[in-house]
Each structure stands twice: as C-alpha cells, then as structure tokens.
Amino acid sequence: MSDYLETKFNDILFKNPVIPASGTFGFGREYEAFYDLAKLGGLCSKGLTLEPKSGNTGMRLWETPAGLMNSIGLENPGIDAFIEKEWPHLKNIDTVTIVNVGGKDEESYLTAIEKLNTIDAQLIELNISCPNVKAGGMAYGIKATTAGDITKKVVDISRHPIMVKLSPNGEAVADIARACEAAGAQGISLINTLQGMAIDYRKKAVVFDNLYAGLSGPAVKPVALRMTHQVCQAVKIPVMAMGGISDWKDALEFIMAGATCIQIGTINFNNPMAPIEIIEGLKAYCIKEGLANIGEVRGIV
Amino acid sequence: MSDYLETKFNDILFKNPVIPASGTFGFGREYEAFYDLAKLGGLCSKGLTLEPKSGNTGMRLWETPAGLMNSIGLENPGIDAFIEKEWPHLKNIDTVTIVNVGGKDEESYLTAIEKLNTIDAQLIELNISCPNVKAGGMAYGIKATTAGDITKKVVDISRHPIMVKLSPNGEAVADIARACEAAGAQGISLINTLQGMAIDYRKKAVVFDNLYAGLSGPAVKPVALRMTHQVCQAVKIPVMAMGGISDWKDALEFIMAGATCIQIGTINFNNPMAPIEIIEGLKAYCIKEGLANIGEVRGIV
Amino acid sequence: MALVQSNTCVSPGIYKMTVDFTGAVKPGQFFMLRAWDKDPLLSRPISVHNYEPGKLTFLYQVVGKGTEILSQLQSNDDVTIQGPYGNGFPEITGDLCVVGGGIGTAPLYYLVRHYQKQNPAGKCRVYLGFRDIAYGADAFAALADEVVLDVGGIITHKLTVLPGETVVTCGPEIMMAAVASAVPAEHAVYVSLEAHMACGIGACLGCTCETRSGNKKVCKDGPVFGREEVFNV
Amino acid sequence: MALVQSNTCVSPGIYKMTVDFTGAVKPGQFFMLRAWDKDPLLSRPISVHNYEPGKLTFLYQVVGKGTEILSQLQSNDDVTIQGPYGNGFPEITGDLCVVGGGIGTAPLYYLVRHYQKQNPAGKCRVYLGFRDIAYGADAFAALADEVVLDVGGIITHKLTVLPGETVVTCGPEIMMAAVASAVPAEHAVYVSLEAHMACGIGACLGCTCETRSGNKKVCKDGPVFGREEVFNV
Ligand SMILES: Cc1cc2nc3c(=O)[nH]c(=O)nc-3n(C[C@H](O)[C@H](O)[C@H](O)COP(=O)(O)OP(=O)(O)OC[C@H]3O[C@@H](n4cnc5c(N)ncnc54)[C@H](O)[C@@H]3O)c2cc1C
Ligand SMILES: Cc1cc2nc3c(=O)[nH]c(=O)nc-3n(C[C@H](O)[C@H](O)[C@H](O)COP(=O)(O)OP(=O)(O)OC[C@H]3O[C@@H](n4cnc5c(N)ncnc54)[C@H](O)[C@@H]3O)c2cc1C
Ligand SMILES: Cc1cc2nc3c(=O)[nH]c(=O)nc-3n(C[C@H](O)[C@H](O)[C@H](O)COP(=O)(O)O)c2cc1C
Ligand SMILES: Cc1cc2nc3c(=O)[nH]c(=O)nc-3n(C[C@H](O)[C@H](O)[C@H](O)COP(=O)(O)O)c2cc1C
Ligand code: FES
Ligand code: FES
C-alpha cells in the first residue's frame, strides 16, 4: 500500500489502518487462500489465554437482524501452543501482528503476559471485555477501577506496549478509557461485543448454554461509533476502533470520529475480501479527496 | 380479542399484552386510518413534558443497518395541551392509555405528575431514559441512586401507578430496576433507545445537531431481550418490554423472557399493521400450542 | 401491495414506474414505497408523477439502497405502496408557472396535467433545470404553453414571472429558496419540501420543519408550503 | 459470483439449483451461498448434490429466510458461492451402503455417482427415509444396485448392512446416531454433520463439535467424521 494510508499508532508503523479483529480471523491462515496477508495493516490473533480452552458448549452462533451473536467462549490453544505453533508463521508475515490476551484472574493474565515477553510481538491487545466466559475478562472491563488496576499490573510487567480492549457493557466507557490511560495503557481498542440474549421460541429455551452471548456486526455500528467518539475525546493515547464496520465508508466514519486504526470483525464472514476492499476504498477516497494521508480527516468531526 | 391474550399488569386488565411504544405512535390518531385502536392492548402517548417542547433542530432521523436513529428531542405540546386536546379523545378509546412523561429536572417531573392527577389515566410511564435531550431524563436513568430517588418522589405524589422506563445506557440495568422497585414503582418498562452516533462522511460532519442520538429497531433486539431477562429476574413488579420487536415471534420471546406486556416501536413505521399482526400471531400461537392464556409461557426460559 | 405495470430507465439513473392503483390522488402528494423486508428498514417517500385511475406513476432517481432496489423491479412484481399522503398542491386558479430542478420535476408533471384539466383557459409555463442531463422535457412540452429548459446553469437566472401567475417550485432546497426570494411578493409561491421520513403519516415527528407558525410535519402538514411559511422572504 | 443455470422446485419446499462452476469438487464438500447483501448477514452452507465440470448442483430445502431467497433465483441470476469447503467423504473401496434422511440425501447423490466411477465393480445400496414426501428416489434408483425407501417410518428399522460394506449417512442427527449404533463395529461408518456456520473456513470457531480427539471444526475438519469420533458407540 501507499503512503496515503500509512498510519502510526504511537511509534508502530502500520502500512494502513485496517486490521482484522480478534476472533474473526483465526491466526490468519484461513484467509491466506483469499489474499496475501502482507496487504493488511496488521492482524490480530484469536483471543489467547494462559491455558488452552475448549470454549463453550452448545450453540455458538446465532444470527440477528444485521448482527451476529457468538458464544465461542475463547476457545484457543493456550499461550504456549500459540508461541510454539502459530507465532513462527505469524512473525514472518510482513505486517503488524497484535496478540490478543484474555484471562480469568489476575494471575492468569500476568503469567500469560510474561510468556509473551519471550516473543517479538509489536502490540498486545488486553481483552478485558469478553462477555462469553463466566469467570472472564469482562468482570474487569466494566468498571473503571478494576480496568485501571489490571491494566497497571499488566503494563508493569510487559515488555510490549499494551492496548486495552474495552467492553461496551459497563459504566461510562470514557471513564474506563481514562482509567486505562492513567494506568499506562499505550492504546485503547473498542468495542468488544454487546451482551445480548437469544431465545428459540420453538424450543421454548434459551439458545446459548451460557445464557447471554456477544452481539457484533453492522447492527452495533451506531453504538460503537458513539463510544469511539467518546473515548477519542477522553484520552490522548491512540484508539483502534471497531464494531460493525462493513465497508470503507464505515471505516472512514470511525476515523473521522478519531480512531487511529480500525478493526474488521464480523463482516469477514460475510465477505472474506472485506479488509482488502476497505483498504482499497480508503485509498481511492484519499486520491479523490486530494488527501496526502488519511490522517488528514482523522477526528475532524 | 379473546381470553387467550388477556393480561393483568398488576390490577390493570389489558385485552392483550401488545401496546404501541411512546413516540412511535403519536397520540394514536394517525393509526386510526389503519385499524380500530380498541383492538390494541393499550397505547402509550408521545413523551410529554411540563412545558411544550419544539424538539431538536437539524436532522432527526437516520437509518442504520436494521435500525433507526432518532433525535426527536421530545417535541410535544406540553401536559396542559395534552390534557385539553388529546386526552378527551384518548380516554374514549376502549383500551388502556399509558401516559409517558419526561422532564428536565425534579420540579418539572413533579409538576407534570401533579397535573396528570387530574385525569383518569390508568398508568404513567416515567421516562427517565430519553437520550435525546441534553438536560433530560437520561441523567436520572443511568444510575440506580438517582433513578430510585426520582421514582420515590414521583410515586409519593402520583395518584396513578408509576411504571419507570429504563435506559439501556447506564450501569447494570438490574440494579436500576431494583432501585425503582424499592422506591415504589409499580412496573418497569425497557428499553429506551441505545445511545449511538452517526457521521455523514460525505459532509465530514456529524449527522445530528445533538451529536448523539437514540438507536431503536430490530438491530437492538438481542440487547433488549437480555436486559428484559435481567430485569425480570431482578424484580417482582411486572415488566413491559420493548426493543426491536417486529413480529409475534419476537414478542413471544420477550414474554418467554418474563415480560408481562410488550411495546411495539420502530416497526410501526415499517409496517403500520404490525401491532395487529402481532396480536393475531400471538393468539394463533396460543391456539396452536393449546395454551389457555399466553401467560402460560411467560418467563419459562 | 400493488402490482408493477412497468418500470423503465428513462435517463441515466432515472426510472419511471407505473403501478396498479385507484383512488383519490392529488398532485403534490406522495406514497411510501417498499419492495424489501427490513434492509433498508424504512419505506421511501416518492411523489406522484402522474395518475389516472388504475395507473399511478412515479419518477425517481437512484441515489441509494432503497431506490436501487426499486429500480430492479419488473412488470408483475409486487411493491408495497402506502398513501397517498401529504397535503398536495393547492388548487390553482389564474395562470401557473412551475419551476422544477432535477428530480424535483417529478411531482410537477401531474400538477400541470391536473391544472390544465381544471383550468382549460389557464396558461401554464414551465421552467426546468438540470445539472447534466435533462429528462421529461418533451412530456412537459406536450402539455405546457411554454417550456424553458436549462442544463448546467442556474434556472432562476432565466426566471421571469408573469402577472397573474402562481408559482410552484420543487427541487433542491437551495433552488427553491432562490425562487422564493426572486419572485415578487404579489405572486403566491408554493414550495414542496423534502425530509427524511420514518412513518410518513405524522406519528414520529421525524420530518419536522420550522415554519413561521411553529413546527410543521413535512409528511402531513406538507410537503407543500407557502414560501413565507418556510423561507425568510 | 456464479451464474444460475436453473433453479426449480422438485417437491414441495425442495429446490434443485444448478450453477456455473468448474474446479475440483469432492462429494461431501459444501459451498457457502448467498444471494443477498446483509439481510441475512451470513452465507448459507449447502452441500454439493452433483457436479460435473461447468455444472454444480445443489438440492436444498426452504426452511428460513436464506433458503427462501435462494429459491427465488432464476436462470441467469447471480449467486455468490464460496468453496468447495470441508473434507468431503473419504474415497471408498469395497461396497457402499448409504443411508439418507430427508434433505440429508442431498450430498449422497454425488457420492454414489463418484463411488461408481471409481469402483465400477463395487456394489452400492441406498436407504432413503423421508417424513412425508419422498424426492430424488428415482435418481438414486437409476444409479444404485438397490434402493430401500421409507416414508413416515424409521429408516434404521429397515437397515441391514451387508458384509464388506462401508456405511455413509447424512440426515437428522438423531437418525445418524441411530445408524451409528445400529451398524456392527466391523463396518466403517461415516456421518456428515451440520452446524450453524459463520465463516465456513475454520476462522470463527462457531461450528465446533466435540470429538474423541478434542474439538473439531465441522466446516474444516468435517463435515464428514468417522462415527467413533463424534458418537458414543
Ligand atoms: C415527500 C417526498 C417526495 C419525494 N419524491 C421523490 C420523487 O418523486 N422522486 C425521487 O427520486 N425522490 C423523491 N424523494 C426523495 C426520495 O425519498 C429519496 O431519494 C429516497 O428516500 C432515497 O432512498 P435511498 O434508499 O435510495 O437512498 P439512501 O441510501 O437512504 O440515501 C441516499 C441519499 O439520499 C438522501 N435521502 C434519503 N432519504 C431522503 C429523503 N426522504 N428525502 C431527501 N433525501 C433523502 C440521504 O441523506 C442520502 O444522501 C422524495 C422525498 C420526499 C420527502
Ligand atoms: C455442511 C452443511 C451442508 C448443508 N447442506 C445442505 C443441503 O445440501 N441442503 C439443504 O437444504 N440444507 C443444507 N444444510 C442446512 C442449511 O445450511 C440450512 O438449512 C440453512 O442454512 C438455513 O438457512 P435459512 O436462512 O433458510 O434458515 P434460518 O432462518 O437461518 O433458520 C431456519 C432453521 O434452520 C436452522 N439452521 C440455520 N442454519 C443452519 C445450519 N447451518 N445448519 C443446520 N441448521 C440450520 C435454524 O436453527 C432454524 O431452525 C447444510 C448445512 C451444513 C452445515
Ligand atoms: C466469532 C467471534 C469471535 C470473537 N472472539 C474474540 C476474541 O477472542 N477476543 C476478542 O477480544 N474479541 C473477540 N471478538 C470480538 C471482535 O473482535 C470485535 O470486537 C467485535 O466482533 C465487534 O466488531 P465487529 O462488529 O466488526 O465484529 C469476537 C467476535 C466474534 C464475532
Ligand atoms: C421516533 C421515536 C420517538 C421516540 N420517542 C419517545 C418518547 O417520546 N418517549 C419515550 O419514552 N420513548 C420514546 N422512544 C423510544 C421508544 O418508545 C422505544 O423505547 C424504543 O424505540 C425501542 O423500541 P423499538 O426498537 O421497538 O422502537 C422513541 C423512539 C422513536 C424511534
Ligand atoms: S415522517 Fe413521521 S411525522 Fe413525518
Ligand atoms: S464456520 Fe467458522 S470455524 Fe466453522
């Protein structure tokens, strides 16, 4: 990609601001059949936890109007297996790799972070916002005090910059973002999924074994855009925004709201080429509007 | 309608549990061209405030995927004009009329409630959750303490039962519901609109003069259903649920989640006959399932 | 539900659709159209371009998802139409001067036809302005006493209103505002406004416009207003 | 994008669609189909019912919005297909016994054709069970050595597996489980699972099923599994 889209997230240089979102892109391999991953601004790993997790039982996906509910429950091979089996492949891709880390308690977060100190990841996305695991990160992510607390402890021991991924389900998101910034976070990403519920009226039963699940996709875009704007107004650290982005126009709106980078989630399932089309769309927009770099419209609203 | 759908909300008898939602149905007159309003379980007035309000300037509507954002800003003729011009018409309709009341401060809420003591409304919906007026109700609705506080004051002076309409934008909605119950509310309704944002990338500007606006429609259903379930688990007073209901199946899911009645909002715009079709659909469901009354599936999940 | 009789492209991006409909329809009224389920969520307001019993015609421009879907309808497809809604143009006596810009010319055709039927002796002149490509001018020429056509310019530059004429204008707001201030005060001027609409019937208050006499609903109190109500003239 | 060659109703609620496609396609694989934008949001997994170069056939049942939209496609319409995905059935040597239930018969037709091409001397027997109305039995009868058809009953009641047969089953999970426990241990039994899918390619972990060797993805590691992997037999 060209200079039109080059974007600095602190001192990390992204070729472009477009990054597939955690959990919607596996560890990238599946999408190599569609395009060269080096075209991406970066990519973000599936949410990892210290121990391997087999995820939630029962139904894991449910479609809603313009949305998708998921209850994957952080199924993942664990940090060790990731470092051994996925990282050697990922590190050779010419793009920024973000490692997404979840945890069930302080200790599991910290041990996971320590293990990641052994690899040369460029950015860690601290997931304190997964609504799908009972003893999970969201407990930290819905209150400014606990969010700040865990962020501080993680920042203290990590040799990598920490971007904290916020939940849309808690108290005022700007307060939480400020607490994370104060605790030393080098970036904020948002939003994780909105907590929702599905009932199968035919079966007279809830759809998900875990009762509630996470809503994502185009349906959530207005909420995600509002929260992105609130957080961009509240903090000085860069923001990586997501939530329902499905084309370059949506991506542009998040950038106009102040986001430095944007992540592409659910729409990957609808259109595997979406990230590439968004990159191309943003570039065409720069050319058409006579922008030297997309950064010229960042935060202009 | 028949006994299949008769529903008691405390001691108020509704012919059926289907009620058009505040702000999506004017004062009912416009829909009389489509059907006899007496077929409805009830109807709910546009949000009223003590003084007439001309509402928000600029764009007021914006479509989103499976959703609608609005920034009406509680345009309404004021309580006095309502009592004088609309109530005489409404009170003669053979259905339950709910009066929705918003306010900018404690005094305006209380004076409005006092004025409503002069008419024979059956139920008041206390709107502490409108995201579209700056000094508006939502300030009360997003914290349990303030929500409980205003509820108590209103309950104390109202001769009508008070149903408090909750915001999905605040702290844990179950806590807020509990606080309202403890303060003497006789019912809870939810959800009001989710706070969202829209940007018009062509104009490089925010869409709404008021910056943020309220999201409703099918897109929000999973969130509304989750909150309905949480609140129904948390309180003993009856719940009137809404948020994205577009057909009888959706309505049934909210009832299965524990709602006593359901309100029909945005979908009225898409299909003016929606409430009637929902009533008929629920009745047909009862017959098909051999239920004597829809209440048999209430709260079964 | 109405059956589509025909739906054809009459100019790049401009379609004319005729559907089965019989009922009382006034010029300046509109229908809410949909030919989709929930994506987009809302119906789309489209003015009456022409009407005779059994035959209701719309002229519309493809600008987004809704009009795109409409443009793909074929004969015998179903389209949901609700209406007619809105106040429509007032009954005009005396001479008529219409000023249309772009797709704003759509409702003026039925107005001119109706006017001529009501006022066989009346004179009717038509100004049409287009940005790039004109459409529908021939049809107006077949009806009106005079048609002034402008492409790429500013139609109000050409506008001279004759004594006794009532002026009706529909087009981009900026054009209608220019007409409203250009036409001498002794002429009545009516403008047809646009607004994003949800319900189309006056229930949602989403289409409110400020007028001299307070808020009005474009869908129900309008879309036609006297110029002095909505413009500072 | 692929062009629809034909799309016809073959039985109430059951459609057969043929589209342009050329590539390597194994029996038991599936494609992700869509003919809509974002309502519904996801593509729909549909098995390969038959394939020859230039001609890919699906057989599907209308059960909801997605399949409803598919059923309305006409010749020369576009449909987006991604695939083929999934492991497909293993290459079978020896004799073959297939057991299909309802729309689960869809992938078995191509399996039988392929099997016979690879094993000209092999014997192939087919059991087909339907709840109300049978479809496709004639086509199987034209290929297979024997077809046992059951409507309204329980197909496993009729099932006898002959020595040397490999069993392949696709249909409601309860039927496949019954087949899995009915067939003596010396026969290999393969089952084709269903799951709600978002990506279809192994990226979302939404279609996971528990197997003896841990979680597997139905879309990528399956949809075909050995019975001992997924059923307690
Ligand atoms: C009373 C009335 C009569 C109308 N008559 C006609 C007509 O006869 N022929 C015709 O072509 N158009 C007419 N319009 C405009 C037409 O309704 C819009 O172009 C249409 O709704 C756009 O829908 P869409 O899904 O294609 O575009 P969208 O994707 O919804 O929007 C595309 C662009 O059009 C704008 N837009 C959307 N809805 C409206 C609206 N209601 N009014 C104005 N701009 C809008 C959007 O802001 C956006 O810039 C009329 C509008 C009104 C209010
Ligand atoms: C690998 C695979 C191959 C398949 N092959 C065929 C085939 O050849 N022919 C055929 O008719 N169907 C096939 N199916 C099932 C088909 O994918 C679903 O029927 C379809 O997705 C339903 O979409 P819908 O929008 O019409 O229904 P929806 O409105 O989405 O749902 C209607 C009902 O179908 C269920 N359903 C939805 N998606 C699936 C799914 N992916 N799997 C199972 N049930 C589902 C829902 O829970 C609901 O009860 C296959 C499924 C898989 C996983
Ligand atoms: C199937 C699925 C799995 C997800 N897994 C994770 C995860 O492991 N870690 C995480 O931080 N977010 C996860 N998410 C959330 C997304 O990264 C993203 O925050 C959310 O989906 C909103 O963006 P979208 O609307 O573009 O999908 C997941 C989302 C989906 C749909
Ligand atoms: C145009 C519009 C106006 C509304 N006005 C009010 C109002 O005056 N008072 C109120 O309590 N809620 C108001 N609401 C919120 C609805 O009553 C309802 O809570 C919300 O729209 C969610 O339900 P729905 O998804 O079915 O529309 C309004 C909603 C819309 C779309
Ligand atoms: S569109 Fe609803 S009031 Fe006019
Ligand atoms: S459907 Fe996504 S992993 Fe199988």
Image (cartoon, coloured by chain):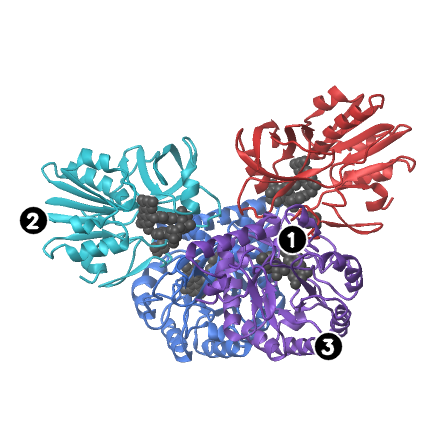
Chain colours: A purple, B blue, C cyan, D red
Left or right of C57 on screen, residue D71: right
**SS class of the residue under badge 3?**
helix
Residue at x-position 20% and y-position 49%: C155
| Location of mark 2 (residue) | C163
From the image, state whether disc 2 or disc 3 is nearer to you: 3
Residue C93 seen in the figure = no
Residue C139 seen in the figure = yes
Return the disc, 3 or 1, that comes first in the chain's sequence: 1
Instruction: Give the residue at the far top of this rendering.
Output: D142
Q: Chain of mark 3?
A: A
Left or right of B64 on screen, residue A217: right
Residue at x-position 38% and y-position 42%: C81
Determine whether D61 is above or below A142 in the image.
above
| Location of mark 3 (residue) | A157
Do marks 2 and 1 share a chain? no
Label 3 Cα crowd, 10 Å radius (few <14 / some 14-19 / many 20+): few
For the residue marked with disc 3, what is the amino acid? Answer: Ile
| Residue B89 coordinates in the image, percent (x, y) | 33, 59
| Residue D135 coordinates in the image, percent (x, y) | 68, 27
Quarter occupied by the C terminus of chain C: bottom left
For the residue marked with disc 2, what is the amino acid? Answer: Pro
Do marks 2 and 3 share a chain? no
For the residue marked with disc 1, what is the amino acid? Answer: Leu
Label 2 Cα crowd, 10 Å radius (few <14 / some 14-19 / many 20+): few
**Marks 3 and 1 close (CB-CB < 8 Å):** no
Say the numbered circle drawn on residue A37. Answer: 1
